Image (cartoon, helix red, strand yellow):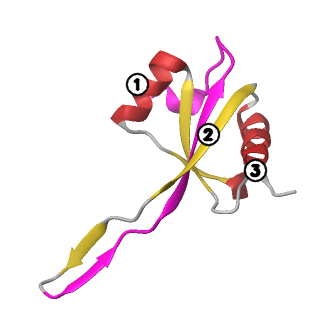
Amino acid sequence: MKHPTQVIIRPVITQKSTMLRMQHNQYVFEVADDATKIDIKNAIRQLYNVDVVKVRTMWVKPKPKRFGIRSQGHTKAWKKAIVTLKPNQTIEDFNL
């Protein structure tokens, strides 16, 4: 079993994720590439001491980037998890 800090890399705080948090009590995290939904659920429960109802995962595709005139590359692909909590529960790290 992995340590929770190896599963959850960072919270994703954007305008869209803030709207999800306010309207549907859902939180967005960047997670490890090999993390399963069960790993994510257990890590959130241990790190933030909340009850998780549902976990959805998806891959964020790399975007093309330019480095100077002739060289091109792309950003890194990463795995995102949207975690739904029970009503009336919050994660304090998101309340800025």
Q: Amino acid at mark 1?
A: Met
Whole-angstrom CA distance, mark 1 to mark 3, is 26 Å
Residue at the far left: name it: 69
Secondary element at tag 3 = helix
Near-viewer residue (27 or 95): 27
Counting from the top left corner in percent of width and height, residue 50 is at: 73, 26
User: Dot 3 corresponds to which residue?
Assistant: 4
Counting from the top left corner in percent of width and height, residue 83 is at: 62, 34
Residue 19 is labelled as 1
**Occupied quadrant, residue 13:** top left
| Mark nearer the N terminus (1 vs 3) | 3
Residue 9 is labelled as none
User: Dot 2 corresponds to which residue?
Assistant: 56
Q: Is residue 84 magenta?
A: yes
Q: Amino acid at mark 2?
A: Arg
Vertically, is 73 above or below 46?
below
Residue at the far top: name it: 88
Give, as a single range, the part of the protein colored magenta. Answer: 70-96
Counting from the top left corner in percent of width and height, residue 7 is at: 70, 54
